[in-house]
Image (cartoon, coloured by chain):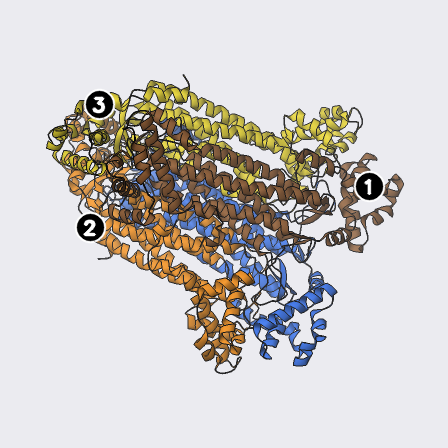
Chain colours: A brown, B yellow, C blue, D orange
Amino acid sequence: MLERYALSPMKELWTLEAQYERWLSVELAALEALEELGEVPPGTVQAVRAKARIDVEKFLAAEREVGHDLLAFLWVLEEEVGPEGRWLHFGLTSSDVKDTALALLVRDALDIVLEKARALGEVLVQRAKEHKRTVMLGRTHGQWAELTTLGLKFLLWYDELRRVEERLRRAREAISVGKLSGAVGTYAHFPPEAEARALEKLGLKPCPIASQVVSRDRYAEVLFALASAASLVEKIALEVRHLSRTEVGEVAEGRPEGSSAMPHKRNPILSERLCGLARLVRAALGPALENNALWHERDMSHSSVERVLLPQTSLVVDYMLSRAAKLLRELWVFPKRMRENVERALDMHFSEGLLLALVRAGMARKEAHGLVAELSRRAEVEGRSLREVAGADPQIRALGLDLSAIFREERALARVEEIYRRVLGE
Amino acid sequence: MLERYALSPMKELWTLEAQYERWLSVELAALEALEELGEVPPGTVQAVRAKARIDVEKFLAAEREVGHDLLAFLWVLEEEVGPEGRWLHFGLTSSDVKDTALALLVRDALDIVLEKARALGEVLVQRAKEHKRTVMLGRTHGQWAELTTLGLKFLLWYDELRRVEERLRRAREAISVGKLSGAVGTYAHFPPEAEARALEKLGLKPCPIASQVVSRDRYAEVLFALASAASLVEKIALEVRHLSRTEVGEVAEGRPEGSSAMPHKRNPILSERLCGLARLVRAALGPALENNALWHERDMSHSSVERVLLPQTSLVVDYMLSRAAKLLRELWVFPKRMRENVERALDMHFSEGLLLALVRAGMARKEAHGLVAELSRRAEVEGRSLREVAGADPQIRALGLDLSAIFREERALARVEEIYRRVLGE
Amino acid sequence: MLERYALSPMKELWTLEAQYERWLSVELAALEALEELGEVPPGTVQAVRAKARIDVEKFLAAEREVGHDLLAFLWVLEEEVGPEGRWLHFGLTSSDVKDTALALLVRDALDIVLEKARALGEVLVQRAKEHKRTVMLGRTHGQWAELTTLGLKFLLWYDELRRVEERLRRAREAISVGKLSGAVGTYAHFPPEAEARALEKLGLKPCPIASQVVSRDRYAEVLFALASAASLVEKIALEVRHLSRTEVGEVAEGRPEGSSAMPHKRNPILSERLCGLARLVRAALGPALENNALWHERDMSHSSVERVLLPQTSLVVDYMLSRAAKLLRELWVFPKRMRENVERALDMHFSEGLLLALVRAGMARKEAHGLVAELSRRAEVEGRSLREVAGADPQIRALGLDLSAIFREERALARVEEIYRRVLGE
Amino acid sequence: MLERYALSPMKELWTLEAQYERWLSVELAALEALEELGEVPPGTVQAVRAKARIDVEKFLAAEREVGHDLLAFLWVLEEEVGPEGRWLHFGLTSSDVKDTALALLVRDALDIVLEKARALGEVLVQRAKEHKRTVMLGRTHGQWAELTTLGLKFLLWYDELRRVEERLRRAREAISVGKLSGAVGTYAHFPPEAEARALEKLGLKPCPIASQVVSRDRYAEVLFALASAASLVEKIALEVRHLSRTEVGEVAEGRPEGSSAMPHKRNPILSERLCGLARLVRAALGPALENNALWHERDMSHSSVERVLLPQTSLVVDYMLSRAAKLLRELWVFPKRMRENVERALDMHFSEGLLLALVRAGMARKEAHGLVAELSRRAEVEGRSLREVAGADPQIRALGLDLSAIFREERALARVEEIYRRVLGE
């Protein structure tokens, strides 16, 4: 089911092979630390490393027999390695190895996601610059509002992306911890000094304190950061879908898909797919938080949830960021259509300017609001521009307003440069 | 429905009165900034401030007529203030005022929550120190595992609380932003300089860029931080429930509730209630993320969701943190029962030590594992301690192991001080 | 927070007064049953009924003292009633009363919701009939597809509404159960015969078996039925929002709301609000299902969740159905604009007909598909109708197709009557 | 990730092969119907059926080229079949085929799940009968309450299972519909008569009305029914976890798993896993409901969600039901331990009987409640049975209560037979 959304190298990360490799890395790092501290005989690590082999099929076969994945892994390794193999896992509990290895996987997954986020950022900045002055109607409540530019949309997403990246980096930090403190986290059989050494080799920090497992609030933070990335992609994709509606026609997916029945169709199916995937990603947060409150020093209910949701969410968010970048990179933009739509707005996007000019001229705001609303209705009904209708209105004429200053596009967009500087710092 | 979980001052924060006060603060700050920049006549602010009054009933009556809450608010104020009132809201759109005011409310709510978190932290540290050496069975999978101390549980929660507090502080920072940039965020009628001044008066920062509204990813971050606090309280409450089961009997709620039918009962209903409330809180995350992807420059679908979930979640999390502190402060602890339970464990909490001693003595790990499992079964069936059974085993005797070193509580808990130092930094 | 969405009589249902009334009804029904069976002295019910009074403040004051809401309720009643009051609650546990009373509340809430659903159905049928032949463009993927009629949209919603009503009726049946079987559901002190009599008086059925409480899967079914109603309203509201976009302009909310900044705006804010509320409602399903797996014969974690979510969801769904009916009743429809949009489609909504005619004429489907796609592109680029472009195409001419039969609106909509008959059965 | 939870034949159902087979079935059924109605030349179906082959790799290769899965499927088939192939998909749109085929898959999935539910029901009834009289402590709020029997727990679950089965059957009915009504559901190119014939061949009913797709409320109902099944399994598994806690020790998983560190452990990991999986399943409800409100006659955002969640939820619920049956079938029950725990309760499970006897004897309920609470405390502190303490109490002695009738197990469980008859109807 997920194959469609699985990209390399994220795909390779969530395989049994990759998992066993990290289990072995953790076991070896722990053993090395013990050897350095004189807790196991010199030469043990070298002997073990020389003979330990990752053989997925063998591990799985052993697991079917033993009924415990990590025990099976150990028995196979011990048999392969010979006598020195008995030192493997010395003083450790399964979760020491599994949780520490899982941190390695999730950290790597976040690195891949961060790289995709960076690439999306590049596209956003590039297209924001390109369309800084591509004027179009802003829309609120699905109704034409005031003028904006296409570039500002890209820029807004870029600004949000930076918050997403910050969340991803924090989540990466939160999850870059291991624990080698034994069955209930008391270091009863594995000393903190060895933990510190072993984790350093793996690029992780020790949890200041742990139960049998690393606290699952850290995983919830990871999933929230990923969901926040998915939410941004949804926002982008939703905008593309809206702007590429036939009636709007201001953008189109670079490679819209056809229809089996109606040969004339060009459907923004990538954007639609991205919106759907966001639903999937945010649904992971409930289970992620349910996973946090375990029984006493640990129960195992979190495990099946994570086995499914960590790969799934990583894969999907990786796909979403990657495809969002592609979507925007290849997006067709139709400035001519944007201009046509602006023309169809009959100057009503300047209604607030007119209202404020009336207030400046001394009219009560409520009265001014009523007058401009009335003029707008008239303009709409008669199909004339608001400027024209306002220019003909006796009350407005009596006030001698400078309509050319009010109905001026340059003025409406005079601050665009400044916004760009604020966001891009240039 | 929520009255039960509404504590002061959080309760007062989520009233219409408090909302209108903040709307007025924003309008006044904006006006003041305009006046400072010479955009409105000198003296306007003073005139407006002197006459503007918060009158909830009047605003509501006007809203029933006008059908738009902020317009109604403005018309009432304009009428009260007289001519200068027309400058109110000059260059602003409703969301400028509402979103900026909402940021003030949420920031204040987070300050209250942070204060409750701090207070919970104090209790946790105090009880952690008190029970540093209160020995008890650790339990994994609901099964007796190795020894731990009650203090370590408090300490673990304290460690997680610090991450929760960090998330709350970040969320506070993320939400402490305003926007006074108009209908589509282009500053068409309100200059960035005025925004900067106005927001500074309110203690907020400007969004680098905004649409009609502040991006809702910031609110999602707030709700996640709150859910993460609720999740910790759930974890604490779940442990209290488990430890106060009749069969375990190691703690009890300070004021357990009785039963209408069974006079002998003492039910941990506060802890149960806290577990239930955590479900409520985490359910807010789906809607919070759905709220982020709005149409174009904004649609209003997020508004009804926030109107319910922001107060509800703030109130509930405030209540949860507050009650969790009380729960732990008043928690009855029964060290005697903990010791009895340890005695009933027949030394099996030392089984790993025995296993490792066998490995050290040269036995293959798999073989050692099998032997200790076998001895444990025998101990259980015969109701004798594992030490006794092991001491009588020919294989073990042959190896001449020092059983007194293996079956020693002090050794199991030798690292407790060190863990405390790591967490408390003392 | 919820006042805005609270309509009578649903609002009155979720008050403390209404709750206590139902508690008393259950206590009295139980007592009456016991008296009928000779388990309590004759005349007890009459004596109790004569003196028992609902006094919310008094109950709350007692609860603050006793710390248990139902015990407080009993002690107050017992004091009021005098000696016969000791028979109140005889053989019952708190949950017997609370769960049975809650069933009464939820059943009444569902009756209100069902009535609102019925009223929405009336509007749907009426508007469906009115617009059976109001021709408009169908749209898939936001792209113009083939022709449809506005009436078919109403009819589709009506069809879904019938499923929603069926779910609500089933949920009503699922929840119309009580239990008066004591602390662990064994009828240790209250006989099944008395339960049967008491529940019959209340219009409920006995659970075939219960623990201390009625199983919470029944409540989850209620919340799903309500969420399914909310989902239909969301679907309706979303369509209104899309069709009332400025660019589409085919419908408008009867009373669209204005903007504080832009006097020309007419925003479909009711529809937007309804979409937001649907998010709120569906978020109740997670907690509802979490509530089902309680500890042993019962823990109390479900209680706080239900205290919030049952009233909230009932109120909101009641509001949504009620407002959806109003929205559609008052909806402005612009058939002229629909026709204009059809004209703008350049006959491309007939592309499939052309494709099939080519297949009928012997062309391979793939080839035909390519040809029609090509002709559509040409029509679009040249701004000519597909019919015109097709008519000029040598390949098509060579096949001698009857284009007037293909490009015919009547044919596209020839089955509308039949669909109506299928749904309305007329 | 899901391989661990994928059982045959559910596993085979969610493969590309099975999907393509159903696509072909739908295309052939539609073609056959057209041929029967004389809409395509006689012999077409036979010619197509003879040559159409499912070749997953070929379809995928074509999709990579065409970028549309159903178009690719058609082009490959058309090429294989030759000229008659052009009639494939005549008058249909992709969703006609995909949605109708998906209904076939989901219906089959529900049949598998229903069979698993039936098998679980058998185990429940069998074990309920076996343990009808296995007396144990009931527990509420984690505290010992009154007596119950183990059989009643099984029976309660069986009662809930019947509701689950009913929901599954209704969902099966709700989803057993197809639609062959074209691009916007108007039967513009495929007649309702042909739809009726084609769907009958497939064992489906026509939707009374459809847009481009079958309404997604039907899928939400399916996912709710599945989540309700998962919730029951969670309830069962949670009970097993609680009863197999070391301190309780009343049951054990037939094959509990060991620990890599602590050879003495026997962990109920299957039950824990089942609890985790329930979190996963219920998280599907949010997305399922979000999928319902699509744009106009359809957008494609639901598709990616369903591609993941339908297989995942089906597989997981199938696994859960299957493993729950196994769990209960192999569950070790320790009646001796149950009896020991009852003994440890010091007769306090009879406290309500004592209370009621006092009320019967004329004591005010509040007073009686206080007295029994006091006696219970004394019994607990002194480690004597409540009966003994009560027998020695002057107030009680004065009333001359028949304590032997009150403290009698047979009386407490006198209604068990009747409950069994109500549930099992025997």
| The quadrant where residue B75 appears | top right
**In the image, is residue A317 above or below residue A175?**
below
Q: Which residue is mark 2?
A: D417
User: How many other residues sit within 10 Å of disc 1, few (<14), some (14-19) or many (≥20)?
Assistant: some
Q: Residue D328 got which mark?
A: none
Q: Report which residue position mark 3 lands on.
A: B408
Q: Amino acid at mark 2?
A: Glu
Helix, strand or loop at mark 3: loop
Q: Which residue position holds label 1?
A: A406
Q: Give the residue type that dot 3 points to.
A: Arg
Q: Secondary structure at mark 1?
A: helix
The answer to the question of whether label 2 and label 3 lie on touching residues, with beta carbons closer than 8 A, is no
Give x and y (percent) for residue C325: 58, 54
Q: Nearer the viewer, residue C48 or B411?
A: B411
Q: How far apart are labels 2 and 3 at the CA level?
A: 52 Å
* Residue A208 rendering spot, x and y as whole percentages: 40, 26
From the viewer's perspective, is residue C138 above or below residue D413?
A: below
**Toward the viewer: B322 or D59?**
D59
Tell me which chain the residue with mark 3 is part of.
Answer: B
Q: Residues within 10 Å of mark 2 (few under 14, many from 20)?
A: few
Tell me the chain of label 1. A
Q: Is residue C168 visible?
A: no
